[in-house]
Amino acid sequence: MKRIGLIGGLSWYSSIEYYRILNLLTEEHLGAHHQGNIVLVNVNLHEFRTLLNRDDTSRAIDLLISAAKTLESAGCDLILLCSNGVHQFFCQVEDSITTEMLHIADATAIAIQEQKIVKVGLLGVKSTMEEGFYQKRSSKFNIEIMIPDPEDCDLIEQIIFRELVQGSFIDSSRDSLIQIINNLQTKGAKGVILGCTEIPLLITQNHVHLPVFSTTNLHCKFAFSKAISQT
C-alpha cells in the first residue's frame, strides 16, 4: 500500500475523519488489524486564517507548501489537502513538490458522473463557493455548479467557522443547511456537494432528498484506490 500524506488541521475535526475513513477502508480491504499507511501534518488553522485576513496570502501558501514538503520527505506517495477551501491554492502547492497530489474536486466530480448528474449545488466556505476554482475544475467533467444566494453563503460561512471547525454541531444550523439545500433543489440542482470537509459531520444523506456528495468520504476513497493500485 502506498503511503498517503495528509495536510490537516484545517480543521482537525475533519482531519480525524480522514484518518478514520482511510483506516476503515484499509481494514475492509485487507482484513482485521491492518492499518493505513498514513502520515499527517497539521497546519495551524488560526495562523493560516490570520494570514489570509491580513492579505498575506503568500505566507499562508507557504504553510501549505512546508507541510507538503514535510510529507514528501516522509516518503509519501500521495498527498491530500484535507480542506476544500485551501484547494484554491492547490496548484501552487502541487508545483512545489514532485509527489502526486489528489484534488478533492476531481474525486467528487467522478462520483457525480457515475450517477449521471450534471447539475449540482455546492455548500462550503465562501471562497469555495464564490472564487470559481471549484467550478473551473468541475467543468472539465461537464458538471454545472450552483451556489446559494449571497445571504445563504454568508450563513454557511458563519456556521462553518463559528461552529463546525470548533466541534459544535447544532440542530438549528443543520435545519438551516437543509433549507438551503432544498432551495437549491427548487432551482434545479439534482445533487449537492458538501464542499466543506466539516459539513458531513452535520449533514448526511438521511437528512435530505437530493443525492449528497461528501467530499471528505470521496477524497478518502479516491486516495485509497490510488494507494492500493499497482501503477
Image: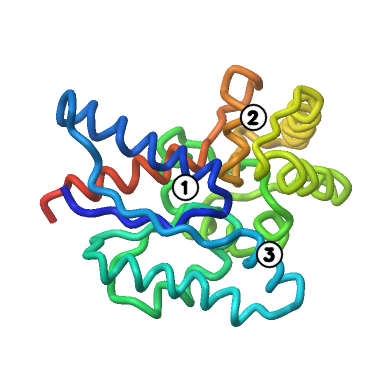
Q: Is residue 181 left or right of residue 133?
A: right
Residue 91 is situated, as x and y percent measured from the top left of the image, at 47, 73
On screen, 141 above or below 206? Answer: below
Marker disc for residue 109: 1
Can residue 72 be seen here? The reply is yes
What SS does tag 1 mark?
A: helix
The amino acid beneath tag 1 is Ala
Residue sitting farthest toward the right: 151
Q: Residue at x 31, y 30 (%)?
A: 24
Q: Is residue 136 left or right of residue 171?
A: left
Identify residue for label 2. 202
Q: Residue at x 75, y 32 (%)?
A: 177
On screen, 127 above or below 152? Answer: below
What SS does tag 3 mark?
A: helix
Q: Residue at x 65, y 37 (%)?
A: 167
Marker disc for residue 49: 3
Counting residues from the start of the chain, the first of labels 2 and 1 encountered is 1
Disc 2/disc 3 C-alpha distance (Å): 22 Å
Q: Residue at x 40, y 79 (%)?
A: 95
Is 49 or 151 nearer to us in this picture?
Answer: 49
Residue 92 is situated, as x and y percent measured from the top left of the image, at 48, 77
Is 111 or 170 nearer to us in this picture?
Answer: 170
Judged by depth in the image, the label closer to the viewer, 2 or 3, is 3
Counting residues from the start of the chain, the first of labels 2 and 3 encountered is 3
Residue sitting farthest toward the top: 206
Tag count: 3
Q: Quadrant of residue 75?
A: bottom left
Judged by depth in the image, the label closer to the viewer, 2 or 1, is 2
The amino acid beneath tag 2 is Leu
Residue 20 is situated, as x and y percent measured from the top left of the image, at 39, 35
Determine crowd level at label 2: few under 14, some 14-19, many 20+ residues with C-alpha closer than 10 A: some
